[in-house]
Every structure is written in structure tokens, then in C-alpha cells.
Image: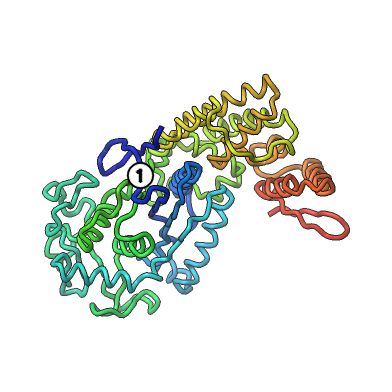
Amino acid sequence: MSLRIYNTLSRDIETFKPIDSNHVRMYVCGMTIYDLCHIGHARMMMAFDVIQRWLKVSGYKVVYVRNITDIDDKIIKRALERGITIRALTDEMIAAMHQDIGALHIETPTHEPRATEYVPQMLDLISKLEHKGLAYQAPSGDVNFSVRQFPGYGKLSGKSVDELRAGERVAVQDDKADPLDFVLWKAAKPAEPDDAKWDSNYGAGRPGWHIECSAMSCALLGETFDIHGGGADLQFPHHENEIAQSEGATGKPLANYWIHNGFVRVDNEKMSKSLGNFFTIREVLAKYDPETVRFFIVRVHYRTALNYSDAHLNDARAALKRLYTALDLVKPDALGIEAIDWTNPFAARFKAAMDEDFGTPEAIAVLFDLAAQVNVSKSTQLAGLLKALGGCLGLLQNVPSVFLQAGAKTGLDEATIQANIQARTDAKHAKNFALADEIRKTLLAQGIVLKDSPTGTTWESV
């Protein structure tokens, strides 16, 4: 069975056919980095982490770009409030993001460009649009995109130009030729700091948000690439505007497949900073171990709304324990990661689920069926398959005994920590360094850092 993906552009599930047969190029809109990431951000990054993992499992070479927006009104405002430079703020927040999503085992993308590193490419793109009559400089100094001059505007979101009214989703300025037009280059304001502006043929200023992604994706993936993704809230206006800019400049499709993940909801409302109903990743990890949080997110299909609550996280923890209980029936050192035999009925069902628009709920159901067989058969081979299939989703790679001994909250008691230190020492003496390292990483995921010395191993909590 071939991989099939729901394409927002066509509003249908399509057989995936990359531009190059064994090579996938994917761009995902990342974070505007002025504060700590919340669980909604984790959901977006987790969705595309699973997607890029499965593409690799399917045999594709993947070039995955997830950008960082490091210049923005909110970033400027926060830096001024804190009395630090924009770079100091964004460096701090990027480091925090990496720490938080690293704990969730979200893999690092191939490229993670910062918008401020691509300003020349943005200006070049704006110049092309101006020469084609698709952009104009307003009296204020801003450069705007002329929406009505681009015939295909609205094809992604399904919104026609005539249906769009000023004041709903589009900011209105007196110097725009049309209220629907959007900014490509923002003229510098007197109160803005020097590190928030660049020189250009249009005067000092900075890029608009939409043009950033058009320039970065083109620079790193080419004028047309396979997959463009992001949260459902970016479909309009951000992704619609990206299409208008990029295709207006090049005359070529920007991306062949558009993928959007669903929202995280709290009390039937979208989780967001503007509503004040968000939980940072750090707040969630203070109560739940990272793998439980990952399992909680992954077991819901990426396009479906994810309902956040402690009850759902507790249920995720209990379900994940059932899988680890099956793995714990065999010795941990017997569970090496081996090549998956996709002709195995369990593996074939798992693959069929993932090949149908990355169907993680059905794939995880296969893991539970397989765990039930492991419980009955005590088969090391089936347990190894369970771990390997879980690994395709970034799950079940911890030492089972360590995971099962941990409670719902992070942190382990002294006896458990010492028992695992001894198990690691025994593994090292037996030259089973893979197991020793796995125990170390599992303890680290629980907030326990091991320190080796000639006199032994000590630990500290982080």
C-alpha cells in the first residue's frame, strides 16, 4: 500500500508522489520565539516529528526545515520590556525551546533557519514581486502585496477575495491600496531599537511575517517542494499569503501537499496565549514524565482536536504502562532494535495504519494487540517487534523497569534510583554499553543526572 496524505489544498486524501522518487523536502512553520512554548506548540512539532519519522521509515531521504521567527512585534515588545537585546531574548527562548521539545524526544530538523539570517533573500523576493506589479510601496514606507492582482488568492483556505472583509482577519491601514493587501516590508518606526531594522532600497525596516517563510523555504528547498505544514490556524492568512508571494514571484507551485495539524482544546476552546488558557511544556513536564506527554499527543490523529486535561494524561500514563508491562516480561537486554519484518501481520497492520494519512490511533491499537500477544506468549521476538514499532513513533525506548517504577509525577525515590544505578553498573561490567546508556537516558528523562567518577556514580536532580 502506498502512503496517502490528506492535502488541505485539494481537500482530499491523495497518494503521495514526491518530486524526486526517494527524496522528500518538507517545510513546517515553526515558532515565533518570545516566550516559552506551550503544549499547543508541542502538538504541532510532535505531529511533524511523527510524519518525518514515518517518511524515513518508509525509505525516503528527508530534508526537513522548521523555521524560527526571531523578529516580530511581540519579540520587540518583550525585549524592550526586559531591557535586553532582541538577540539575547531570542537566543534564550530558542535554548529553552530546544530543552523542552528535546525532553519530548522531538527530533532536530535538518535545518532550523532563523528569519533574521535571510533578510537579503526576502528583499530579493519583494523586488521580484514589485517588478511584476504585485507589490507597491505605500506613503508610510511599508511595502504591501496587492492581493487582487494575484488570481489564485484563496485557493488554500477556500476564501474568495470578495468574501473577505476588512477588519475581520486582515489589518486595515489608511495607506493600503486595498484593505485586503498585506505587508511585505515594514518601515522602521522611531521608537523601535536599532536591532529591529535593516537597510533596504525601501528604507530602513524589517520583513513582514509571511515573506519570511517564502524566502526561507525557497532558499533551502527550492521554488517548489513536496510538503508544507503547520498548525490549522496558519492556513489563513499566513499560508494563503505565502502561496500568493511565492507563486506570484516564481510562477510555480510552492508546495504539492499542504498538511495542517489540529488544535489543542481546553474546555472546548482552542488553547492559546491570547485566551490565557495555555500550559507551557515545562508546566506539564513538572507533573508528567515526557513519554506520557508524547503518548498523550501521538495517540490522537494529527488532524483531530486534542483535548487537554489531567484526566486524559493520567489515562495516557496508565495505557503506556500496559505496553511497558508487556516489554518487562522479557529481559531488557534482549530487546535490541532489529530491522522490522513488515510481512509480520502486526507490522503489516501498523504500516497500513500509518500509510493512511499517518493514522497513529490505529497504529497504537496494533501495539496494544501485540502487547496482548506478548503477555500470553512471553515471546522475546514479539516483544522486540513491539519495541521496534513503538520506536517508529518515538515511544517504548525506555528501560521498562525504570518506566514502570516511576509514578505519574516526574522524579524517582532514592531506592529506585540506586537500583537503576546498580543495573547500569552491572550492564557496563557485562560490556552491554547499549543498555547502560539506555538506563542513563531513561533516568535523565525523569530528571535524574548521573555523574561518573573513579569512586563510583552519583546523581543529582534537575
- Residue 87 in sight here: yes
From the top left corner, tell me how far across and down residue 336 is, in percent: 68, 39
Q: Give the total of numbered labels.
A: 1
Q: Is residue 399 left or right of residue 92?
A: right
Residue 217 falls in which quadrant of the image?
bottom left
On screen, residue 220 above or below 372: below
On screen, residue 14 above or below 226: above
Residue that sits furthest to the right in the current view: 455
Coloring applied to the structure: rainbow
From the top left corner, tell me how far across and down residue 252 is, in percent: 23, 57
Residue 330 falls in which quadrant of the image?
top right
Q: Is residue 158 left or right of residue 92?
A: left
Asked whether 93 or 255 is in front, the reply is 255
> Looking at the image, which residue is at 24% across and 80% down?
201
Residue ID for mark 1 = 260
**The residue tagged with tag 1: helix, strand or loop?**
strand
Residue that sits furthest to the top in the current view: 376
Asked whether 140 or 198 is in front, the reply is 198
Asked whether 266 or 106 is in front, the reply is 106
> Looking at the image, which residue is at 60% across and 32% down?
320
- Residue 278 in sight here: no
Q: The residue under label 1 is which amino acid type? A: His
> Looking at the image, which residue is at 25% across and 55% down?
243
Quadrant of the image containing the C terminus: bottom right
On screen, residue 438 above or below 455: above
